[in-house]
């Protein structure tokens, strides 16, 4: 398929518009491509799909927040829904595909794009959305005939449910080819074979090509659905009978048994900790997704219905925004704190230019500041400051401090973010003109789950974890963080870090 002109540039412009929270500009970019190229398939392959890949990469590198990632994804889904009504498909092929995100997988934009691509190629498509229970998939397959079942699994935790569906389909002897995709299969390219699927695709366009090949070659035997349990060899446990216990004194035998029991308990505790951290990760990720979607759609309603909403309706949307934002911050902070408690805070230093970096992070908070007409002002006497830090962690420090300053600042005020350095250290200072902290509470602000009597100027609630996370990250960099505050006049947070 021929790509549209300047596809990389257009995809970059589209993502930049969404990261600026400008849906109108993003839609205009896509509309212009559609007008010039005349093919929705080109728009999906050359604009939307690369933009979503880049979005995921930026989130993994810590360059954007989870809220930004979910906003851009939700906005793209809305745009796809509009474009879907304008599909110009090829001549019907007579082939049918059932597409779904597996139960527990709340991500649907990727599989939705795959379903639309099948439809563009003349397939009759049934897209049943995200978090589809295995039983619903099987009931649908038993009632209607499909050539291909396309399933998506984003996280490792979704693979077991997908494997269950594969086993159930094979057990029912259904004449259907199973195509899988999603992040879990990109990380492990051979995973699809081990669970017994017929094929694996890494893009919407590739999914159609593989599906058509599978359907055309129905004589090829299906892979045996090999349980994941069978692929994991149990650890070798030393046989205590192999030891010369008779040669040991009775006291040494007792000590050995006690040590073995302690090792077993430690192993059990390590397993429980691993399970706890995994559950926390899955829980936090799956909670953040719907919370961010709620906030995004609330914002879309506010934009799309501007001028038609009454005061009471605006109040409802504002309440939705504030509640979802607080819950999202609580989930993010709880997950971060869980990692810190588990001593899993790993610092990976790399050189960055701190002035430009700080400006980018501050810009991410611009939409929050605009709600209160607050000015964010970044200044530095030196045009550039080189420092070796963990970029994603320092991003979090700056984001938390600036977000905290916005929360407690008065409308129409200024937040100053100043940078300085000497031969061995760099200093970041965030100063606000807000409500300040009472003298008897200044010493407790860095303690986990501690909140002050001061409330946000717009009624915002505090999770009590943000500053504790800041201190942990700064100290992990062998730095220090301090606070000076006067009740009613504002606060100044200072972070000092070694340059290398």
Image: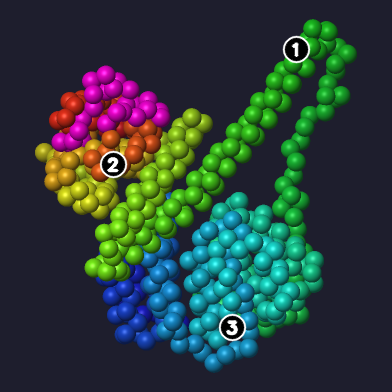
* Residue depicted at x 40% and y 77%: 82
* Residue depicted at x 37% and y 53%: 320
What is the quadrant of residue 314 in the picture? bottom left
Q: Disc 3 versus disc 2: distance between alpha carbons?
A: 51 Å
First-in-chain label (3 vs 2): 3
Residue 124's mark?
3
Q: Nearer the viewer, residue 327 or 134?
A: 327
Q: Are marks 1 and 3 in contact (CB under 8 Å)?
A: no
Q: Which residues are magenta?
A: 430-454
Q: Nearer the viewer, residue 56 or 95?
A: 95
Name, please, the residue furthest toward the left.
381
Q: Is residue 44 left or right of residue 131?
A: left
Which x, y percent locates residue 486?
17, 25
Residue pointed to by mark 1: 255
First-in-chain label (1 vs 3): 3
* Residue depicted at x 26% and y 50%: 368
Q: Is residue 162 left or right of residue 471?
A: right
The answer to whether one can see residue 170 in this image is yes
Residue 451 covered by magenta stretch: yes
What is the quadrant of residue 259 in the picture? top right
Task: Please tell me whether mark 2 sits on a helix, a strand or a loop.
Answer: loop
Residue pointed to by mark 2: 459
Task: Please tell me whether mark 1 sits on a helix, a strand or a loop.
Answer: helix
What is the quadrant of residue 400 in the picture? top left
Task: Please tell me whether mark 3 sits on a helix, a strand or a loop.
Answer: strand
- From the viewer's perspective, is residue 66 above or below residue 79? above
Q: Is residue 180 left or right of residue 362?
A: right
Magenta stretch secondary structure, dominant: loop
Residue 444 covered by magenta stretch: yes
Which x, y percent locates residue 295?
38, 56
Please name which of the two marks, 1 or 3, marks the residue nearer to the observer: 3
């Amino acid at each position: 398929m021929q790509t549209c002109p300047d596809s990389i540039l257009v995809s970059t412009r589209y993502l930049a518009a969404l990261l600026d929270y400008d849906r109108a500009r993003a839609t205009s970019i896509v509309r212009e491509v559609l007008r010039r190229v005349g093919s929705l398939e080109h728009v999906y392959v050359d604009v939307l799909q690369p933009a979503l890949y880049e979005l995921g990469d930026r989130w993994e590198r810590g360059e954007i927040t989870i809220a930004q990632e979910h906003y851009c994804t939700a906005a793209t889904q809305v745009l796809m829904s509009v474009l879907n009504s304008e599909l110009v498909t090829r001549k019907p092929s007579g082939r049918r595909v059932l597409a779904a995100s597996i139960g527990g997988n709340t991500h649907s934009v990727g599989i939705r794009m795959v379903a639309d691509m099948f439809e563009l190629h003349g397939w009759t498509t049934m897209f049943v959305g995200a978090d589809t229970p295995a039983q619903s998939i099987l009931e649908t397959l038993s009632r209607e005939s499909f050539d291909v079942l396309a399933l998506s699994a984003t996280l490792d935790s979704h693979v077991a449910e997908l494997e269950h569906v594969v086993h159930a389909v094979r057990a029912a002897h259904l004449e259907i080819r199973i195509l899988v995709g999603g992040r879990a299969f990109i990380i492990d390219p051979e995973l699809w074979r081990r669970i017994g699927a017929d094929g694996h695709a890494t893009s919407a366009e590739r999914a159609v090509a593989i599906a058509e090949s599978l359907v055309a070659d129905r004589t090829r035997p299906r892979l045996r659905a090999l349980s994941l349990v069978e692929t994991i060899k149990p650890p070798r446990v030393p046989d205590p009978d192999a030891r010369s216990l008779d040669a040991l004194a009775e006291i040494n035998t007792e000590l050995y048994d006690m040590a073995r029991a302690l090792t077993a308990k430690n192993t059990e505790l390590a397993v429980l900790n691993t399970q706890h951290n995994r559950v926390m990760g899955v829980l936090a990720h799956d909670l953040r997704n719907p919370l961010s979607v709620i906030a995004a759609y609330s914002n879309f309603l506010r934009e799309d219905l501007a001028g038609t909403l009454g005061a009471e309706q605006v109040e409802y949307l504002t309440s939705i925004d504030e509640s979802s934002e607080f819950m999202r911050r609580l989930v993010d902070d709880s997950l971060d704190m869980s990692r810190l408690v588990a001593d899993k805070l790993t610092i990976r230093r790399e050189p960055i230019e701190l002035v430009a970096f700080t400006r980018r992070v501050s810009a991410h908070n611009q939409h929050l500041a605009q709600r209160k007409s607050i000015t964010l002002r970044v200044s530095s006497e030196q045009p550039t400051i080189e420092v070796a830090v963990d970029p994603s962690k320092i991003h979090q420090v700056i984001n938390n401090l600036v977000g905290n300053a916005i929360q407690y600042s008065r409308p129409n005020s200024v937040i100053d973010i100043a940078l300085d350095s000497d031969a061995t250290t760099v200093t970041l200072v965030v100063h606000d003109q807000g409500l300040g902290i009472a003298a008897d509470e200044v010493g407790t602000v860095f303690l986990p789950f501690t909140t002050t009597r001061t409330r946000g100027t717009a009624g915002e609630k505090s999770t009590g974890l943000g500053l504790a996370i800041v201190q942990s990250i700064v100290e992990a960099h062998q730095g220090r963080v301090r606070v000076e505050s006067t009740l009613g006049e504002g606060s100044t947070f200072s972070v000092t870090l070694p340059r290398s």
